[in-house]
Image (cartoon, coloured by chain):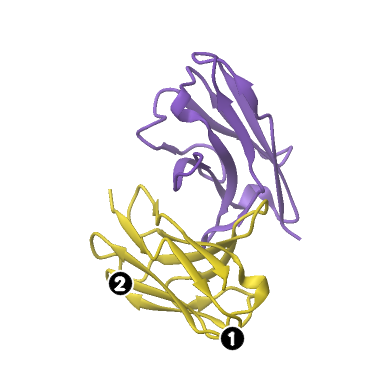
Amino acid sequence: EVQLVESGGGLVQPGRSLKLSCAASGFTFSDYNMAWVRQAPTKGLEWVASISYGGSNTHYGDSVKGRFTISRDNAKSTLYLQMDSLRSEDTATYYCARVGGIPFDYWGQGVMVTVSS
Amino acid sequence: DIQMTQSPSFLSASVGDRVTINCKASQNINRYLNWYQQKLGEAPKLLIYNANSLQTGIPSRFSGSGSGTDFTLTISSLQPEDVATYFCLQHNSWPWTFGGGTKLELK
């Protein structure tokens, strides 16, 4: 059974950093591209970043480009999102999702990030 | 960016009703459209991919149709367990973008 479990969320002050993790199981992690998607309170879903299966190619949404870094450790079957220079508008639930032949075919349950002083 | 306009935002229906939810793309996305269901506190679940392909394990009362700019998710006979928020995703062009969601409740 495919499982994606996010962790690392919490309350953080504006301008500070936070690193999210997503532990994957139930499939060969190194065979799949992966992504982060977020949903701000009362707002729609927004694609944040994607990374290729080997980690060499990354893409970012305009709202996080230059501040967030997606990475992965295939030996640990874990996806990461390093979030720097956080802003109040980054407050959201963050989901990791698998990107296979069918984009976003599996999602984690999400982790909440609140940016507030 | 491609804008996905989903309607209605809120829908109330009775058990056994036929329910339709729509997504309209701001430009041609061919058939690169997925539909998801998200129940409160749960991970989103893929229902339909590439406009009309039913994901493995999803009940056949769910179906998708459309191509180009107009797409529809249909639940042929609403069940109590279908209470959820539904949203679409276009994956034709980067950045991939989502519809705003439809919250479905029982009447």
Residue B5: percent from the left, percent from the top? 32, 59
Vertical order, B19 against A42 (above or below): below
Q: Is residue B99 left or right of residue B38?
A: left
Residue B93: percent from the left, percent from the top? 32, 54
Residue toward you, A69 or B15: B15
Residue B35: percent from the left, percent from the top? 49, 66
Vertical order, A105 against A50 (above or below): below
Question: Which residue occupies 49% across, 20% down?
Answer: A86
Identify the secondary structure beneath mark 2: strand
Vertical order, A32 against B82 (above or below): above
* Image quarter of the N terminus of chain A: bottom right
Residue tagged 2 = B70
Whichever of callouts 1 and 2 sits on the residue coming sooner in the sequence is 1
**Count of labels in the image:** 2
Q: Amino acid at mark 2?
A: Asp
* Spatial separation of the CA atoms under disc 1 and disc 2: 25 Å
Chain hosting mark 1: B
- Please give the label number shown on residue B76: none
Question: Which residue occupies 65% across, 30% down?
Answer: A9
Q: Which one of the lettered chains is coloured yellow? A: B
